[in-house]
Amino acid sequence: MKKVMLKTTLSLAVAMASTQIFAAGFAINEQSISGMGTGFAGRSSSADDASTIYGNPAGMARLKREQVTGGVALLDAHTDISKTSSSPNGGTNKGDMVPFIAVPMGYYVKPIDDHWAVGVGVYAPFGLVTDYENGFAGRYFGTKSDVKIVTLQPTISYAFNDKVSIGFGPTINRIDGTLESNLSITQAAPDGKVKIKGDDTALGYNIGVLVQATDSTRVGLTYHSKVKYKLDGDTKVNYNVLALLRQNPSQKYDASLDLTTPESVDFSVTHQLDDQWTLYAGSTWTRWSRLEDITVENKGVPAVLNGQFGSITEEQNWHDTWAHAIGASYQLNKQWVLRTGFTVDQSPANNTDRSPRIPTGDRKILSLGAGWSPTDDLTIDLAYSYLREDSAKINNSNDRGQTYSAKYQNYANGFGIGATYRF
């Protein structure tokens, strides 16, 4: 039981790694529709619109007009599950656990003078929605997850001159999670349910520098800080066999979980070849090795059940990752710009600790996009991305002899639409 319970509770931290997310680990890439079109190459050096608040807050200094940028990314993920084995035997492996979801974003930037600019952004840096079918063969290691992190970032930037600018934004981050899995103490009894809920608000910051190295080349460097959460909520256990222990079959315990989302560093280059062609390149390092283990504390557990539902710890052993992207844009005419990009992104998980909640492997992403400016004040951006992952192996077991192993092959389509209006 110990591992089954842990696989549910730790998901509040790591279940966010799922196929509907276009970045590795439990990060979300979709904070910019214009950036999505180039595969997020040049994320910290392009500064094309107000979404630079996330990509590089120093880029606000390049925006000479007050403007608002908003958009939504629509993600459609699919999984083929094969080579399955489970104990007890039976159960389904449909692979349709990720619903069609939307990731919204919004930003506002106002230049104050030739040096100062202020802005504010709202976006989702992390998140997950997964929901396996009833009777899923791996149900003891995770059935449903709904985890969201929303960030509010007030931001300020300063341009020293027309070459160098810096930017800084504190982040106010809200996490909410609800997670479920099946629970079975004996094979003779019907399955019960474990449901975890928790939330917290925590602070972090983003800081960046942007340098116009030459007339045609910009370089950017952005640091996104770690954020420490202490999630408080409850663990609800509903299982009839508890009545045999003279316990209410529906029990609720206070739960807490410490979670640190990792810091990351993005370095990007934007190079304008001529009046039509612009090239982008970038690399992002993320310190996923912070996730060595997860410990969940449940309070108020009766002594007879404390060994099952008290303090639970499991190693995760994630490793640091790199993501690399290249892209290009072509200014077809005054109204239209076309974009494309290609990204490779490492997964921080390993074959030993990967679970049905984190079934991801290394991924490759091909992106296409376009920007249409019918007037000087309005730009409408469109983007499409296709993601395909290397196959990932699941090999889970617990101390009651329940097992689940499978091969996951994940792929996804992403669609983005956004707009920037300049005042």
Image (spheres, rainbow, N blue to C red):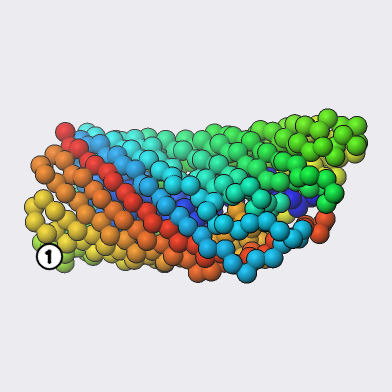
Numbered marks: total: 1
Identify the residue at image location x=34%, y=64%. Answer: 366
> Which x, y percent locates residue 140?
71, 51
> Which x, y percent locates residue 263?
50, 52
Q: Secondary structure at mark 1?
A: loop
Q: Is 312 positioned to the left or the right of 175 in the image?
A: right
Answer yes or no: is residue 232 visible: yes
Identify the residue at image location x=54%, y=38%. Answer: 175
Q: Which residue is mark 1?
A: 274
> Which x, y percent locates residue 278?
19, 63
Decide: is 226 above or below 171: below
Q: Is 278 positioned to the left or the right of 252 in the image?
A: left
Task: Identify which residue, 284 or 337, lies in the foreground.
Answer: 337
Answer yes or no: is residue 362 visible: no
Q: Quadrant of residue 245?
A: top right
Mark 1 residue type: Asp
Q: Quadrant of residue 116?
A: top left
Q: Is 154 positioned to the left or the right of 340 in the image?
A: right
- Label 1 packing within 10 angstroms: few (<14), some (14-19), many (20+): few
Q: Is 128 positioned to the left or the right of 308 in the image?
A: left
Identify the residue at image location x=59%, y=67%. Answer: 82
> Which x, y percent locates residue 409?
52, 65
Q: Quadrant of the C terminus?
A: top left
Identify the residue at image location x=40%, y=43%. Answer: 102
Task: Identify which residue, 303 or 143, lies in the foreground.
Answer: 143
